Image (cartoon, grey):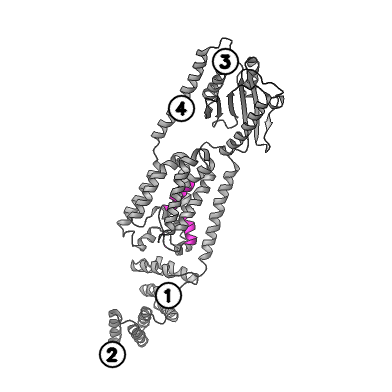
Amino acid sequence: MSFQEQYIFWRLTNYFLVEEGYRLIHLHEKKQELWLDNPAQKKRPVIRIQMKELSWANVVERDIEQVMRVCEDLRKQMGRLKLPLINIYITPFAPVGDISEWFDKPLQSDNEKISLNNILIDKEAANAQLPDLEASLDIPAGTFHVSEDIDEAAVVKERSQVINYITAKVSEEQVQARKEKPYVTYVLLAIQIAVFLIMTFTGGTSNNTYNLVRWGAKFNPLIYAGEWWRFITPMFIHIGLLHLLMNSVVLYIIGPMAEKLYGKWRYALIYFISGITGVVASFVFNVNVSAGASTAIFGIFGALLYLVVLKPHIYARSLGISIAGLVVVNLVVDLFSQGIDLAGHIGGLVGGFLIAGALSMPNQYFHWRRVLYGISVVALTAFFLWFGFSKGQQPYDPQNANGVAGAFIQNEDYDTAQTILNQLKSSNSADDVTFTNLAVIATIKDNEKQAAIYANEAIRMQPFNPHAHFLLARSYEMQGDLKQALEEASIAVEQENSETYMQYKQYLESKIQMR
């Protein structure tokens, strides 16, 4: 190639980068080809510039077919419905043969999503063809005028300006990246550590179900009762120090990467919303008390996997294998471990993938696919919420809920215990333990008649229930029926010869004798 073609190649590149703010998305200096995109002005076309000898018309035809395929892939990666492309050929001479069908008018792809405008600039007619290029791109006339005395120094100057500009932009981005700390990740880590410390000093987290539920762990009966905020709080609560350390380490590793790729506010939304979708999935499929940042962390996994789908040529090797490996390993561990909330992890993973698809990455062109991702995550979450709440209206195993209610009774939080037990009643899930606990609360609140009703129901469901007989005896005593009270106390002693029941029976006998 002569100095003239080289000069035009670098002059065009220099202008689009520096003057119009285009960015370089591909450069192959050996093939003397580059692609430019303008993210700041999305109406501007993508530009492809190639310096090449186009000897024959069939060479042009094959190249244009290849450009169409590349452009379609590029359109999908950018997430654009349609993509205009200016395809500029810089060549020493015009190709032999009829090329009018490719250069006289814009071309359309078969799906009409690619608009291709081919422009030929050859050495002999360059100063006549460059004004057409300026007009087609609305560039000031005379911008690309080529004088006859172009020498190597002029080419080197234009090329150096391009290389220096690109180098400076890369350095600027690297400096900016180093300055931008992953503050959102740091804040999330600080919150969950602070919550853990507070819970540790107010009762602990490892074996204290009462403290976990009190601070906001996911507990279905209280969600059924209207405590919707339990879809949010569990992602900040951890069950033991090991649980906290594991989640904190994983978040510290993958969080900064996701925060950098998606930007702070997108990353924060992905974290919170996927955390909620994970809790919703746990709400539907897991009746146990659960908590932890794992739902949100799996949401970050899902968001990173979305990048592999969105831009496989960039992230498939660098990111896809490592993230996919982490996901698979974690899910396999979930399958063979007790106490792991597998449903919550899968819910967070799917939620993170869909939310990332709805938000996409910064500086991406809008695509209706993002709307579909957004509709999908909303529709799935709404469906699972409906399904989960409908399960709360049907009978279910009350054992777990009875245990938690008992813990609240022991800690004198009778209102919360009453809420849990009432929910069991309303769903027809209550058993003898449920009614025994209700009788305990009624007795504490000096509601003897209600206590008797609950105790009798507990005995009806399970006659061998010494504590219910004891509570029924207390109720009869408070109502003045000492004979009935003694009868029930005697049954309690027969069923369980405990000191409490024996002393109470003796107390009733002495009270009757004193009459």
Which of the two discs, 4 and 3, labels the residue nearer the N terminus? 3
**Quarter that holds the N terminus:** top right
In the rendered image of this protein, does residue 507 appear above or below residue 267? below
Pick whichever, 56 or 381, lies toward us: 56
Identify the element where label 1 is drawn.
helix
Camera-nearest label, 1 or 2: 1
Q: Return the mark for residue 513.
A: 2
> Which residues, given as a range, are shown in magenta?
278-303
Q: CA distance from mark 1 to mark 2?
A: 32 Å
Q: Quadrant of residue 142?
A: top right
Identify the element where label 4 is drawn.
helix
Give the residue pinned by disc 1.
435
Camera-nearest label, 3 or 2: 3
Camera-nearest label, 4 or 3: 3
Give the residue pinned by disc 3.
2
Circle 2 packing at 10 Å, graded few (<14), some (14-19), many (20+), is few
Q: Say whether residue 512 is magenta.
A: no
Which of the two discs, 4 and 1, labels the residue nearer the N terminus? 4
Prevailing SS of the magenta stretch: helix
Q: CA distance from mark 4 to mark 3?
A: 29 Å
Give the residue pinned by disc 4.
169
Q: CA distance from mark 3 to mark 2?
A: 125 Å
Say which amino acid is labelled 2: Gln
Q: Residue at x 48, y 47 (%)?
A: 270
